[in-house]
Every structure is written in structure tokens, then in C-alpha cells.
Image: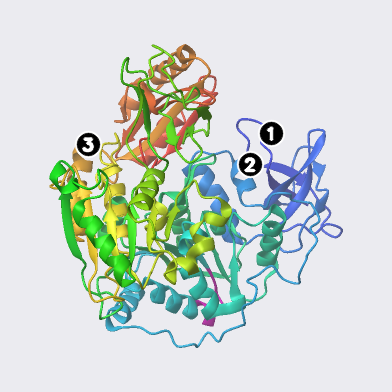
Amino acid sequence: MYCEVIPIRLFREDAGVLTYAFDQVVTPVKIGHIVEIPLGKTKTYGIVVRIVKTVDFKTKPVTKILYKTPLPEHIIKAIFWLSEYYLVPLPLVAKMFLPQGLGVSRRRKTKSTVAKNSKPQSTSENIPLNTAQKQALKELAKVKSSTKLLFGVTGSGKTNIYLTEARTALRQQKSIILLVPEIALTSQLVQIFERTFGHKVILIHSNKTEAERHLIWEDILDATEPKIIIGPRSALLSPVKNLGLIIIDEAHENTYFQENAPKYSALRLASFMARTLKIPCIYGTATPLVSDYYLADKKQALVTLSQKAKSTAERPNFHLIPLKNREEFSKNRYFSDKLLAQIKDNLANGYQTLIFHNRRGSAPLTLCENCGWQALCPNCFLPLTLHADSYQLICHTCGHIGKVPKSCPECQKPDIIHKGFGTKLLEQELKKLFKDAAIIRFDADNTKTETLANNFDDVKNGKYQIIIGTQTITKGLDLPLLKTVGVVQADAGLSLPDYAAPEKTYELLNQVIGRVGRGHLDATDVYIQTYQPENPVIVSAINSDYDTFYRTTLRMRQAGHFPPFYYLAKLSVTYKTEAIAVRNINAIYRGLAQRASALGIEVTKPTPAFHERIASGFVWQIFLRSTSRVKLIAALKTLDPVLSRGLHITLDPPSLL
């Protein structure tokens, strides 16, 4: 007998499947088996995707079968779909579905790698549901589309919807995949699932070692009982048999798009799997992506949960403070007088304050006042950020670290200034203003012990009175003592040259505002400091008016030829010298322009990328836009293979940056 195998090693540019022989008595190969195969002068691994009886050419034999249990059928279909949908060679996609260190014998420290210290719970355990949640469950059941969008405002109790749907699937002996943006940001959700379903929960996350992840993968492959797999987008690649439900929490998060090759959206892959298996896939979010909302509304697959889960939950009091009005900032340049007074009152009465600013470090710009010199990263040509605690200049793109100059390298004058501010500077200012307060900061500069996940219980119990952070603190936090949220500069992200900038700003504001008004306290406050108090994005976020934000953004997207009305493809090249980058992107542009025009596809002229220079060189790019994704892919398939060397293609990029 013979089998077609996708090797996990790229063996040529048009790599696909290779055919191998096997003895069906000695080595009974099945579709989905992971096998060891000869490739050239070495051996590699691959996935069997087809069995054939005869071939008219010479073949090499399969060396061995690694696991008795084959991969589920939906995984095989997903590999082919991903390769075609995102124009990625099959070997690169196949490798993504298999654990690292394949073929390595792993030693087990314990009998099982599933959730520890968790007793099995009965799946009939009572899950409290209010009237709105019960109605949402009925509406979800009525939706004909396999993919359903659960638009639930912050605090509406989406978790109990997830629990109920998971319990139903388990009763049907079906497994569940629950995707979360990051385990650390959703620790409460994970704890609730572990508490409810105990040993049935399997956690996957980046803190586990390669060996641990490999053993978990084997446990899932060999599982004879239904499981609940919880993890980031990679959890979707797990070899889960009898999959009955996929849930994507915080479905708006950009972490569900894989930025490194092979580039793909976990949301789109989840939808494909759900269609293939005829099972439900629920996108849960309080701030739906405009494109997802548009499609769900069009397909009548939208379910809204607008009522807060707790009847005592009341809308917070909002204070909109113009940053241009310096009279409001007589005591401190970063915090308004009203916000400082509220923090002082909170400290006196045992309440917590959360300060949000989506920029880490101390100052994002280091300049010479005399000649205008600016401290830029030598790799990326982007501004270096001052970190005052370590007194270093750090690039937040490539990680380059430099010394803080005492004088200007250009004019030698000592007129070096630091402009702008980040979370570290805000922390220092608050420590000066409130010397006796317990203050903690959460951002990407935290060490492993300083992360929110490792300090969550102390934060929840009120050990810290002031919490400062970037978007790390905008989600998954339900703090009973939190009375006030302060947004230091609400419009910080609106100036970015990206069609998704308003969406990201609305999402962050909505999420951070949602940390209060959850029914724990009688009255809560939100202080919004902004240079643009009348901006429709900020006004919509304050009023929790997604409908107005959505309709305004949709009109702008349609006028600008952006998703959901147009499909996008980003083509970029990176070379050590800018001249070569410009020459090659221009050659690609010339090769595409005429054919694309014939297909009705828009092609932008070559431009430097937003991050024009990175560690590996200069980046130049072009964008393709079309109302037809099929035509877009057809145009990309006509690219000259010679010109395409070194070309990076991103289909459906979530951002222009």
C-alpha cells in the first residue's frame, strides 16, 4: 500500500505531499498517523493525509508510526484549508499542529499533566443564570450559522454562558476548546472553569516547558474521555477527538492573529473547524471587531447580552477632563486636581484606584533642545524610551539598550530633555504624591514575579491601593474594592496611521471603564483625561454606545476601502540596504500592477513600513485591496517566483502598522 504524507520540513518552494510505501501488516498506516519518513539523505516526520493502492513510480518506505492514535479528521482538513486560505506551504502548516521535539521520549514526573489539585466536579452542578442569560442561551441555540457572536457588555456574565454551553457539550460526551488571549490576563475565568469541571480541564500556556507541552499534547491525543482545553490560539491546534464546542473569549484581541509565519487568524480557523464539524463556535466579547459584528449581523448570528449580571451594578460617574485646560492640573502635570482628590478620598476610606496609560517606560522621547537631535534605535530608527529606574534607553521594538547621554552627540550641548510619559514615570509621581500608599505597576517590563497573575490575590484583597498599568490591567479584573478608574490620556492611540486605531482605542477605553460599575460598590467614578473631549470614539466609549461607534466606523471603512468591505493583503520586503529594498518592492509592484488592475484589484504604490527599519534591515511594502478574496489570491498566485524570494505576504492583516 502507499500513503501521501505532508513532511514537516520544507523540501522545495512548491512543497506539498510526498508518496511513501508501507506494509499494511507490519506497519498499518492510517490517515492522520504521524510517521517517520526518509527525506533526501536524512529522516523527518510527517502527517499521513491519504491512502492509495497503486502508484507508477518508485517510492521509499515509511520508517515507523510514532503514535498509534491518528490525528482527528478535522485537523487534516484544517491543514489543507490553512495552506490554501493563507497561501502557506503545507509543510509549514503541518509542523504548526505538532509538538516541538517530536520523536523525543519524554519522562513523566506525575501520572497526568492535566490540572493539578482539582477534584472532579459533577457536570450537573448548578450554574446561576439570570433572565437575560437564559434568553441569550435560547437565541444562541436558534442561530443557524455555526459561528455565533455573543456581544455581552462588561459584567453581563458571559462566563456563565460559557459554563452552561460547556456543560451541555460534556453531557453529550464532546470536548471543548476555550481560547483566551493570554492565561495571565484571564486567571479568574480559568479558575472558575477549574473549580466547576476539575480534572476535565487541561491548561496550555507559554510558561510550560517544551517537555510539559509535549506531554499535554500526547494526553489530549490519547484521551478517552471528553476534555476542556483552555489556552491561547495554539490550543486550537490540539488533537482533540469528538470536539463539540469552541469558545473564543475576548474575541476582539489582536493576539488571536499570529504575526510570525505562518500568519493566520485563530478566529477564522475556529470558524472553519466549526463548519467542518457542524458544531457551535462562540465569539464572546464586549467590544466586537467591526468586521466580525458586520458579518454576524448580516448572517443573523448576533446575540446581545446587554444586562449586567448583578442587579446592583450601576453606571459609574464620568468626569471628562480636557488636557488643554491646564487650570485643571494645578497640583501635577499628569493627574488632574479632581482625580488626585478622588485618590486621596479612596485612600482614606479603604478603596482602590486604577490608573491606565497604554505606554510603558518613563519617557518615549529623548531630545536635544539646542539642535533637535533625537535618541533613535540604531536598528529600527524608532525613538528610544527612557526607563528612569534603570536609567537606560530601551527600544520597545527590538530590545536594544543604550546609555542616556549627558550631552548631545551632535552639538555637544548639555541640553538633553525627556518628553512624554509612561507607566514608570506615573508610578514615580504617585509615590511622591502619596508616600504612604501601597502602589503596584503592571506592564511588559514586569519580571516573572511582578506579573498580574502572580499578584492577583493580593490586588483583589486590597493589599495594593493604587494599581497602574498598560492594557494588561484592562481585562479579566473584577476587584470588589475598586472605586475609581483614571485614564491619563484617552486619545493616545488615535493619531496612529491605521484604519484600526479608532477600534483599538474604543476597545481599550471600554475595557478599562468596565473594571468599575460591576455591583460591588454603591458608587464608582471614571476620570477621562484627553486632548480630544469631543472625539466620537471617546464619547461613544464613555456612553458605552457601541452602536454609534460601529456605524461611524463602518462609514469611514467603506469610504476608505477597508474591511469588511474590502479584503487586504500586505506584501513586504526586508533588506540590509534601503536601495535594494526599494528596487525589489518596485519590481514586485510593476509585476503585479497590470494583472491586478485587470482583476479590479487596487495596488498601493511602494512605501516604507511604519516601522521602516528593524534589526534585519529596511522594510518596504505595498497593499492590495479587493472586494473579492478569491481575486486577491488569484493575483498573488501570479507573482514571479524569482521576485517573490524574500517577499512576506500577510493576508487579512488586522492592522496597517
375 above or below 260?
Answer: above
Viewer-nearest residue: 87 or 218: 218
For the residues labelled 3 and 2, the Cα–Cα distance comes to 37 Å
Q: Kindly check if marks 2 and 1 are in contact, taking CB atoms under 8 A apart as contact.
A: yes
Q: Which is nearer the eye, 202 or 282?
A: 202
Which three-letter amino acid code belongs to the residue tagged 3?
Gly
Q: Position of residue 339 (x, y in %)?
A: 23, 56
Residue contact at pointers 1 and 3, CB within 8 angstroms: no
Residue occupying the point 42% across, 39% down: 651
Which quadrant would residue 588 be assigned to in this image? top left
Q: Which residues are magenta?
A: 169-176
As drawn, 621 above or below 68: above
Cα separation between marks 1 and 3:
41 Å
Residue 370 percent across, percent down from the top left: 31, 16
Mark 2, other Cα within 10 Å: few <14 / some 14–19 / many ≥20: many
Q: Residue at x 47, y 69 (%)?
A: 188
> Which of the two labelled residues, at mark 3 and mark 2, occupies the earlier sequence position?
2
**Residue 169 appears at what percent x and percent y?**
50, 77
Q: Is residue 361 left or right of residue 262?
A: left
- Which SS class for mark 3? helix
Q: Earlier in the sequence, mark 2 or mark 1?
A: 1
Left or right: residue 70 versus residue 480 is right
Q: Which residue is mark 1?
A: 11
Q: Of the residues tagged 1 and 3, which is closer to the observer?
A: 3
Q: Which amino acid type corresponds to the residue marked 1 in the rendered image? A: Phe
Label at residue 91: 2
Q: Name the residue carrying label 3.
A: 560
The kind of residue on which mark 2 rests is Pro
